[in-house]
Amino acid sequence: MRILIAGGGQVAELIARRLIREGNDVTIVDADADRCRQLESLLDAQIMQGNAARVLTLRRAGVSACELFIAVTDSDEINVLSCLIAQTESRARVKVARLRTHEVKEWRRLLDQSGVKIDLIIHPETDIAERILRVIRLPGVSDIVDFADGEVRLFGMNIEKGDRLANKTLHELHEQGAPRHSLVVLVFRGQQVIIPRGNDALRDGDQIYVVATRNSFESTMEFMGLRSQRELKRAFIVGGKQIGIEIAKRLAVQGVNVRLIERDAARCEKIAGLLEKSVVINGDGRNQALLEEQNVGEADAFLTLTNDDEDNIITSLLARRLGARKIVALINRPDYLPLAQRLGVNTTVSPRLVAADRILRFVRKGWVLSVTTFRQEEAEAIELIAGERTKYVGKKLRDIRFPRGAIVGAIARSDGEVIVPRGEETIRPGDRVIFFALESVVPKLESAFLADPARVRS
């Protein structure tokens, strides 16, 4: 497939790398000459310097022949305009644009009424808000990701010092009564990423990911020592940007007492007019005296959502030391994610990874249904459809030599059965298979499923 990407930032790089890996022909257009040179050294793609809002630039980039157009520049206006150009100049079957404006709902309506067809408009702030709200009531849970239309759920958690799970092997957890349809599938230990096997033991400080079927999700959480959904009474948000305001609004509707801290006094006045049910405080979230004065130690949730990664990490550590029960930090730089986890920030969200995964989940066709990235692209969860000629079909899992660093986490059968399989199970045609794997071995998994090229998802 010929793919044209407008914008050469980190989101574009993440998307391009994965699409290139699947054998697609990718071209990237970016206005910054230095970034273009950098991308040329990183990607096996055609890189062109130029303004994506100009017709001649996109023509030179081959827009007329592209089948998929993705607009992820830093400008909403350029993203919309470039999609309009692609609509008139190309045969692109799918067009995707990222918009960051708080008026995204109005833009969706206007574009639809004006006949500008954009198949997917992603709004990272909305996606991040939903991701945070999914885990905000669960103090020990760092993340929740759904697969197979919600029939398979993955959650992340940290192994704290003295935790009863520490030093236990996966075999021992099974013997102690771990729910049958559950499995530890990823372990992040410092800089190391482990796809664990039965004899591997969990350690203090590990961040682990556990997969479970929807029906066994609650019992798995309970077995792992995590509290069920609890009442959320008080929440603090540091940062008065769009994402902070969005989450404050949603929590206030749920009856949560929300306090939002913002350094800019003029911004505070504007926010106060938008958040009638919340308290807006003009101050610095890094100020320990301010946090103590506001009784942050009694907070059920503390969210640091400024645009500064360092500030978010520092403020999160202060809140944790003061006793806030649930800490969430917004981290823009993927290379900061492991650092934040090692420092004890139990939930981090990356706008760039969220945006890339959202786009890739939509544009996948055929055998790849979704890809979810963890930390610095060190590991992935990949959801694939098994076809009649897929390499692994019809064999018991214990007899298959999967690439080292990959594990089958769950299978959703075409007849509705959902399992976390053991060695006796087989992969059948039509199964949705969820693998967890090191990034380096994902191409091998994909090639095994690509062996059935006739399989196409509508």
Image (cartoon, helix red, strand yellow):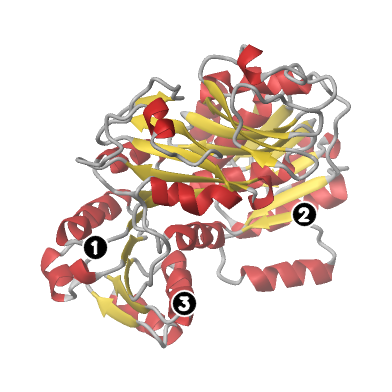
How far is mark 3 from mark 2, CA to CA? 28 Å
Q: Position of residue 87 (x, y in %)?
A: 83, 51
Q: Position of residue 193 (x, y in %)?
A: 40, 26
Label 2 near label 1: C-beta < 8 Å? no
Residue found 72% across the figure and 54% down from its top: 120
The nearer-to-camera label among 3 and 2 is 3
Q: Identify the element where label 2 is drawn.
A: loop
The nearer-to-camera label among 1 and 3 is 1
Q: Position of residue 356 (x, y in %)?
A: 58, 43
Q: Identify the element where label 3 is drawn.
A: helix
How far is mark 1 from mark 2, CA to CA? 41 Å
Residue 284 versus residue 83 in the image, above or below: below
Q: Which residue is mark 1?
A: 324
Left/right of residue 356 with respect to residue 85 in the rendered view: left
Left/right of residue 224 with respect to residue 388 in the rendered view: left
In the image shown, does 199 or 98 lie closer to the viewer?
Answer: 199
Residue found 71% across the figure and 67% down from its top: 108
Q: Amino acid at mark 2?
A: Asp
Q: Amino acid at mark 1?
A: Ala
In the image shown, does 251 or 146 lie closer to the viewer?
Answer: 146
Sequence-earlier tag: 3 or 2:
2
- Residue 332 seen from this side: no
Label for residue 249? 3
Left/right of residue 411 with respect to residue 166 in the rendered view: right
